[in-house]
Amino acid sequence: MSSVITLPADTNPARLQRDRQESVSPATSKATRNPKATARYLLLKRASVRPTPALYFKDLTAIAGDSVIANPRIACRRVNVHYGAKHAIRNLTLDIGRHEVLALIGPSGCGKTTFLRCLNRMNDTIDGCRVTGEIHIDGRNICHDGIDVVPLRALVGMVFQKPNPFPKSIYDNVAFGPRLHGLASTPAELDQIVESSLRSAGLWDEVKDGLGQMGTSLSGGQQQRLCIARAISVNPEVILMDEPCSALDPIATAVIEQLIDELRQRYTIVIVTHSLSQAARVSQRVAYFHLGCLIEVGSTDVIFQNPRHKLTEDYITGRFG
Ligand SMILES: Nc1ncnc2c1ncn2[C@@H]1O[C@H](COP(=O)(O)OP(=O)(O)O)[C@@H](O)[C@H]1O
Ligand SMILES: [Mg+2]
């Protein structure tokens, strides 16, 4: 039989002595000595005050973060979208600021593209799609029946996942919108619009000597910048981008991301991205969607470093999605 007697932890003289010196409780002193334990302890502490995921699911209508902001460019209120019986967007309330890049993130099928399409009434073109609620852009409700969607889609331009230049020359791709909307009264004015749009899209220097070439002959990244120039050519206020870099290589992606940052000075940009690192690089605010619900919206820093909602945290830490 062993003669060694092990004292219970709280009566261990050495521990008691050290705790007295540190003037903290035994549990805290242990945690502060061990960084790993401290991190685990803080995580557990945070976890213990959180509701369970099941409770979050019950409360999908409550949006975490600041969905309503001062002086927004776009204000969405109680927006619902149905495709037939499918309820794709549920009671969404969200403001989008001026000169900000808002990134929409969330698992596939959560409604990001559907929401984006609400902002320039592109859902009107889909049979069986029904949008209710209010979407105000600069104070005007664009869901109103009396709204002419042609000028609306110039005001709120869209850039798609796959670059889709028209089968026309580079010049004619960019001149198409200004011609349609009668924005130039002379050929020289049209030349000026084409040049300034291509410059804003960061493409002018690469194409100025070949404006007669087909837009489709450009590289993927150049085609996407041509599509951005085409959107810019009709003086938009808002540019919507639906996974604009998903078909591009990393170098072309970096060029577009740089461009997005420059465009933010003049336009409101809403971008759907499946790349969390891209959302972190290009956006000032992030909105996280789940099963058609806006779960959380906030500054990019907060969403990535201190998300308030368990579902957001699970998504950004890669637990699902
Ligand atoms: N044209 C459509 N007709 C019917 N259902 C659609 C249509 N477009 C999207 N949906 C459905 O609406 C939901 C949201 O889709 P979507 O907005 O494309 O999601 P995300 O862009 O986040 O992947 C999905 O369940 C999808 O299947
Ligand atoms: Mg989509």
Image (cartoon, rainbow, N blue to C red):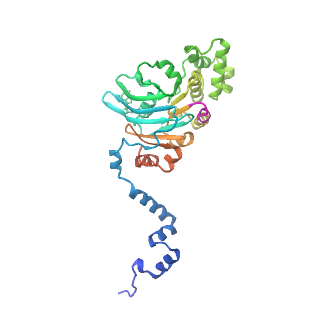
Dividing the image into 4 quarters, which one contains the C terminus? top left
Farthest left residue? 85
Front position in the image: 173 or 307:
307
Which residue is rendered at x = 49% and y = 18% of the image? 150
Provide residue 118's location: percent of width, then percent of height.
43, 28
Using the image as rendered, state which of residue 261 and residue 226 is in the foreground: 261
Q: Is residue 168 visible?
A: no
Above-or-below relation of 189 to 95? above
- Residue at 55 percent across and 32 percent down: it is 268
Nearer to me, 236 or 198: 236
Residue 116 to residue 59: above or below: above
Res 250 → quadrant: top right
| Ligand 1 placement by image quarter | top left
118 versus 187 height, above or below = below
Residue at position x 66%, y 25% in the image: 204
Query: Is 68 in the magenta?
Result: no
Region of the chain picked out in magenta, as a range: 260-267
In the image, taking residue 105 as reference, residue 100 lies left or right, namely right
Q: Give the percent coordinates (x, y) of residue 55.
A: 33, 49
Q: Is residue 303 left or right of residue 50?
A: right
Task: Residue lying at the far top in this picture: please name it.
Answer: 186
> Is 139 placed left or right of 85 in the picture?
right
Would residue 136 be seen by someone viewing this image from the given angle? yes
